[in-house]
Image (cartoon, rainbow, N blue to C red):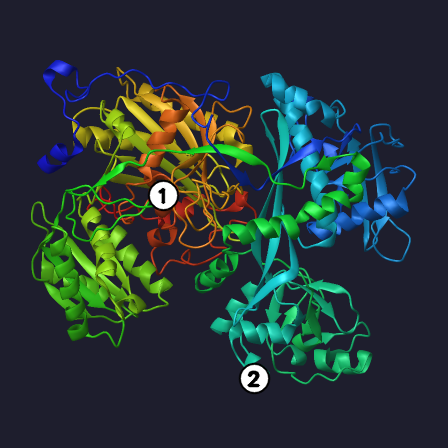
Amino acid sequence: MHMQHRDSGYRSSRGDAGRGRHFQSSQPAHRGGHSGVTSSRGGTAVKTNAFTITTLPSKIYYQYVVGGLDFQRPDDFLETDYCSEIAPEVKDFDRRQEVIRKLQTSVAPGTFSSLLIYDGRSLLYVSSELKLPGSSSASFLVSLTDAPPVEGARGTYCVKVTKTTYEPIRPSDIINLLNHRDPQTQAAISRTVTLLQILIKQAPNQRHPNNARAYFSEEDKRSIPRSGLELWRGYFQSVRPTLGKMLINVDTTVSPVYQEGPLPRLVMDYLAIRNARELDLSPTDRNFTKLEKFLKKVKLFTGHTQKIKVVRSLVPRAGMYEFVNKDGETTTVADYFKKVYNIHLQYKSIIGVCVSPPRSERPEILPLEICTVKPGQLYKRKLPEELTSAMVDFTKLDPANRLMMIQDRGPLSTYTTSEYIIESGMKIDPQPISVQGRLLNAPIVIFQQPADLKMGAWNALRHKFHSPTGLHRWAAVSFVDHIHVQALSAKMRELADCCGQLGMSIQSPITIEQGHGNNPEQILTSILRKAGPDPEGSHLVILIVLPQSAKTLRARIKYFSDVHAGVRTQCLREFKLKKTSNQYWNNVALKLNARLGGVNFFAQSEAMKNFAKAPTMILGADVGHPAPGVQHPSISSLVWSTDHRATKYSSITRIQPPRLEFILDLQEMVEAAIKDFIRVNRCPPSRIYYFRDGISEGEFETVAQKEVELIEATWKTKKIPNPPKLTYVIVGKKHHIAFFPEGGSTMNDGKGNCKPGFVVDQDLANPFSKGDFYLQSHAAILGTSRSSHFTLIKDDNNLGLQGLQDLAFSLTHVYAKATRSVSIPAPVFYADLVCQRMGFHIPPNSSYHGSDTASLVSGNDSSTLDLDAWKAEFGQVHDNVKKTMYFL
């Protein structure tokens, strides 16, 4: 405890009203807003993947919705505020597009005489006001079959089109609106941007598989063996307003896609089997469940009708499945296909697919061998862990190739051929714009002595940790059969030698054991008994060797250690131990020392000196959402710094309703952070810098406003006499802006990327933000470096844009387990790590562990998830480790 007080650097005395006697007041940093002179003026020009709209559409557009309006006043209207009235409901994007296309071309071409611009969900735009039979609203019957449309008939849809009460959209006015930057015009600008967004996507989306963000082409694809999947390269495009102009951001992207072709071939590839007879699976087989989940909602062509069918479930021994035909006779699927279609099934006893909705009176069963997978179906679930390396390998492109693909193979060519863009009169410059940027001064990284920093990287070799701890009570266990006790003992001696060289004090391990993956809790409990209770100031650490594929085993171990027993663990991968090096053991030591409460190194800069002038707390926050199709809660995390160098962090995590963007329990979590800060420093923070990850741009305003309210409510409920001042910053990682310096540029790192510390804060600025900038803080090991986008929402600390840039860049150098600057500030990275540990909080024997649908009360949407049941299962981190950096 005393050591914590000394290390924090924050001390109070009776004469300083609890504000910390080592802190001096400082003048507020200059606020470098977009309207004033900022740091990038006079910088160096680099290309970026953004293209100028040189001529905006000259036409006027009228907005309609597919469905009825669900609002009282025009100002209430959002994209999702409509009653969807394509009836019966059509969930498939392509099918909705087909319905609207036929509405225009066949059903009512006189009414829809100008091109329809449709977003595939609810919004319709036309350049000539529609003469609807019902004045502002009309319904139409659309048949997707050859038969005339009849209400209620199969394949017939009723489409309601309703005019909104908005003023017509005049895209040519947007530059004038941007230049004036009147908050009253922001809604009009947003509507114009939405229109332009849909306009540029219309042509490629009609020709290529796509999602809400990008379209994909099989012209550049790669198969992934033993997965049933292949990777398709695609192109993201987004219209972005900036100061005085409109830009289109174009980038490469990648999506996994189901392999097209015969369904048996895909299934056998996915299960890694060679003989089709091995597909005689029962519902209790692991592969049956695994395959059913993989194939659900996949679209198929059938050899006997060529109609598109959708997989709902699997059926064992499909050829032998018996049913009553329309003549009242009992027959089998095999006999039916032989009699009706003259198709002789080769494999009667293997699985088939059911393509009927649940609880159908007469299920439709199809044998695998008559099914063909429809081309171009995006795989929308989370990619399995073992396939991520293939994804990364295909995704990485060096900067020159990436820019070449954007310009030569991307959507730029469609901008001159798209009938929608041509009709609008819009023109886009095919040359990427150049932006002005500059390099920030890198901080000094200090172990016990300053490190040699080159291109954002440094080495721990020949250095000692700034505040080393000790491996006094530790043990090791191997869950890999061929790494036995003797071999593991030799490896642990290598680790101990490395830790000693870095300044850590080392004692002999308590025990080194061989464990069995089918019951890891048993051996861990045995080690705890041998070690006995932790004496004051000393903590047990168990090093654990895992096999290459050990997702379930690792989850069991981490639940036991983090939640159940409260013991520090460090997992090591089998393949890493085959050829260990000093560099590898250094990386392990970095994690161990930080987990045990030590400080590996810190960043010294003007920003960090200012940070230490008053009791200051950094908060990093994130919300992690379940993958598409998975019925899990979202998980929220908050980490906070407790020392004057922002190197030590604690954390708290909660679960909340799925897809909820703001952190529901943020007030309670901030209260816990302040309480812990006071425990360590004996004074409350006078300044709080809140770095928030994981908010999409469309949610900035609503989420930030709600979270600021929750944070500031903490001051009131705790009755803090001198509330801390708050700076709220959103950190975005998932944007698509990239930078491409010229070959001889001073910004070029020699690999075609910009050097670490490159910042742009003017030419790509959001005209309605208090200030925003792009910071490329790290050097890319492979491919193109990706910057982070920082948006300043609230700045009661008067940090200003340049002050925030310097602080953020310094914080990318204090990520405890890496000897290089990282892509986002360390506290944001830590919050992300905490969110990734969702599976470690659920008991291994729980029905909620690994389930996609556990705890659904009824139905299948987020409102039916039983959150209370999840909370009952969700274990909080044990008191023994929750104040440590266990998440490294």
Read off the residue under disc 2.
275
What residue is drawn where x is 77% and y is 65%? 307
Where residue 515 sits, quadrant-wise, is bottom left
What residue is drawn where x is 66% and y is 23%? 175
In the displayed structure, would residue 644 be above or below residue 600?
A: above
Q: Is residue 290 left or right of residue 209?
A: left
What residue is drawn where x is 45% and y is 23%? 38
215 and 418: which one is in front? 418
Picture coordinates of residue 296, whole percent (x, y): 60, 62
Residue type, mark 2 in image: Asn
Tell me, yes or no, if residue 121 can be seen here: no
- Name the secondary structure under disc 2: loop
Q: Are marks 1 and 2 in contact (CB under 8 Å)?
A: no
878 and 303: which one is in front? 303
Tell me, yes or no, if residue 21 can be seen here: yes
Label 1 CA crowd tier, 10 Å (few <14, some 14–19, many 20+): many
Q: Which mark sits nearer the N-terminus, 1 or 2? A: 2
What residue is drawn where x is 71% and y is 49%? 204
Picture coordinates of residue 172, whole percent (x, y): 73, 25
- Name the secondary structure under disc 1: helix
Quarter holding the N terminus?
A: top left
116 and 151: which one is in front? 116
Depth-wise, is mark 1 or mark 2 nearer the camera? 1
In the displayed structure, would residue 501 be above or below residue 765?
A: below
Picture coordinates of residue 96, whole percent (x, y): 74, 48
Read off the residue under disc 1.
829
Label 2 CA crowd tier, 10 Å (few <14, some 14–19, many 20+): few
Distance from Cα at disc 1 to Cα at disc 2: 46 Å
Q: Is residue 628 left or right of residue 677?
A: right
